[in-house]
Amino acid sequence: MNTIPKIHAAHKHFFRSQITKDVSYRINFLKKLKAEIESKEQAIYDALYEDFKKPEFESHLSEFALVISELDLAIKNTKKWSKPERVRSSILTFPSSDYIYKDPYGIVLIIAPWNYPFVLAMAPLIMAIAAGNTVVLKPSELTQNTSLLLTEIIENVFPKDLAISVEGGVDVSTELLAQHWDYIFFTGSVKVGKIVAAAAAKHLTPVTLELGGKSPCIIDDSIDLKLVAKRLVWGKFLNAGQTCIAPDYVLIKSNIKEKFIGLLKSEIISFYGNDPKTSPDFARIINASNFERLNKMLQDVNVVFGGAIDSENLYIAPTLIDEPTLESKVMQEEIFGPILPILSYGTIEDLKAVIWNYDKPLALYTFSKDTAFKAKILRTFCFGGGAVNDTLIHFGNQKLPFGGVGSSGIGQYHGKFGFDTFTHNKALVKRGTWFDPNFRYAPYKNKLKLLKTVFKYFS
Ligand code: NAD
């Protein structure tokens, strides 16, 4: 037997031993994981820098700190969240005590992407362990330094039958997906999400799919544009635009577009200087194929700022594109890089024509001071999550569920939503034996009227 089926069988065996049902067993490992991660803080920043020159500040903000707060929350609440929840019983079950038992699914497969390679692997792993599952993690092959470190951290903390990191590319992922898991949690592209869903369907395995899409940013003319420009430049160019919830393109009221482009230019310069290539605060494109993909988006469009590239260093400058057509490459697929198309609109109908041209987005951002306009946008468009008057920040609140809708994803996580994702709600009625009226049992003659009355008054 080769390694992957062996690991799969070992996890199944280990889960069935019932060891993970012990809540304090789980919490001990979460504490150990926290200590290990804290002891490797600098190594994590170094690995992310080696992988794509991710600035330490961004690594702390968007990876390390999020993982630690997810761990703190899980350590504090796992005991409470795991307890059976008592619910009111029904007249139909009387006499009874009714509960929702919190069952772990069992053996979980987590497949992670490269763009936030630490947090997008660790956050689901933490909640899967907190909920009492075993975990096989497949980190991304594109961030070799971070993936190696993830493997080392997991090896140092967990017995390998409880959690293990299996490194590799598509072949390893494919072999993992061929196994029968109890739950699959996937973060990555829509294209691969469909492959994962098809593999899961073979075994009817439940899935969470955290995918992508084209996330719009709508700006009307009622708001201070300088603040908008600052918040948009931050959300778009963090991680060099390689963020699943980055604003993909801007839709701005036509009368303020020119002024806004000017403000975007000055904010980009104030963030990264006149030559962002020399800025220590601007990351690189992950690999040559993504660089080429992005480079093609710069052809045959009106670049009004940036546009500089350096293939050797996988550098693409923060770039603004004015009024690309919907047929242009940059408007045909998720950008996932430091290129920002700016389109103007006049009416809500114009917004619908663009946004409904795509599948439901993972995120949507609206900048406006006009209450009626904001309400209309939020009511009209369906999207995974988002923010009013800012970008990205909904990712940081553990009290908010994070996930897509339609082709931007299935399911949600973060905080307790993550724990719930990896938990089966087992419904249980504990029936009393001291009272057993005969009316539900055959023969039914003369009982229907009574049954109807019971339903009418008590259900
Ligand atoms: P990807 O889909 O190429 O890869 C993700 C994972 O799937 C990797 O571990 C990879 O090894 C594996 N994989 C790749 N091809 C596979 C195949 N044919 N069969 C089985 N497994 C395969 O995605 P990526 O390039 O790493 O990440 C970028 C995409 O992820 C973007 O579309 C982005 O929007 C999305 N994303 C979404 C979220 C979210 O939370 N919704 C977060 C980050 C990234």
Image (spheres, rainbow, N blue to C red):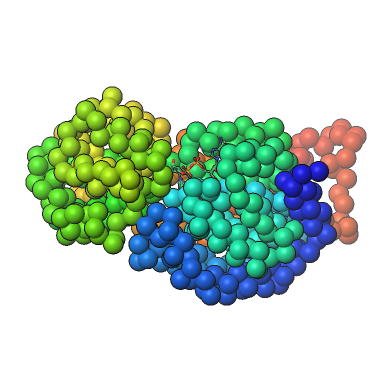
Q: Is residue 345 visible?
A: no
Q: Quadrant of the N terminus?
A: top right
Which residue sits furthest top?
327
Residue at left offset 72%, top offset 46%: 4
Image vertical order of residue 455 relative to residue 106, above or below: above
- Residue 53, image quadrant: bottom left
Picture coordinates of residue 128, whole percent (x, y): 63, 57
Residue at left offset 65%, top offset 61%: 129
The residue nearer to you, when weighing 222 against 304, is: 304
Q: Is residue 26 visible?
A: yes
Residue at left offset 21%, top offset 44%: 308
The answer to whether residue 285 is left or right of residue 102 is left
Count of labels in the image: 0
- Residue 282, image quadrant: bottom left
The answer to whether residue 273 is left or right of residue 25 is left
Which residue sits furthest right?
443
Picture coordinates of residue 173, whole percent (x, y): 62, 41
Residue at left offset 53%, top offset 47%: 141
The answer to whether residue 331 is left or right of residue 121 is left
The answer to whether residue 332 is left or right of residue 278 is right
Picture coordinates of residue 133, whole percent (x, y): 69, 57
- Residue 277, image quadrant: bottom left
The residue nearer to you, when weighing 427 against 46, is: 46
The residue nearer to you, when weighing 360 against 302, is: 302
Picture coordinates of residue 216, whole percent (x, y): 30, 41
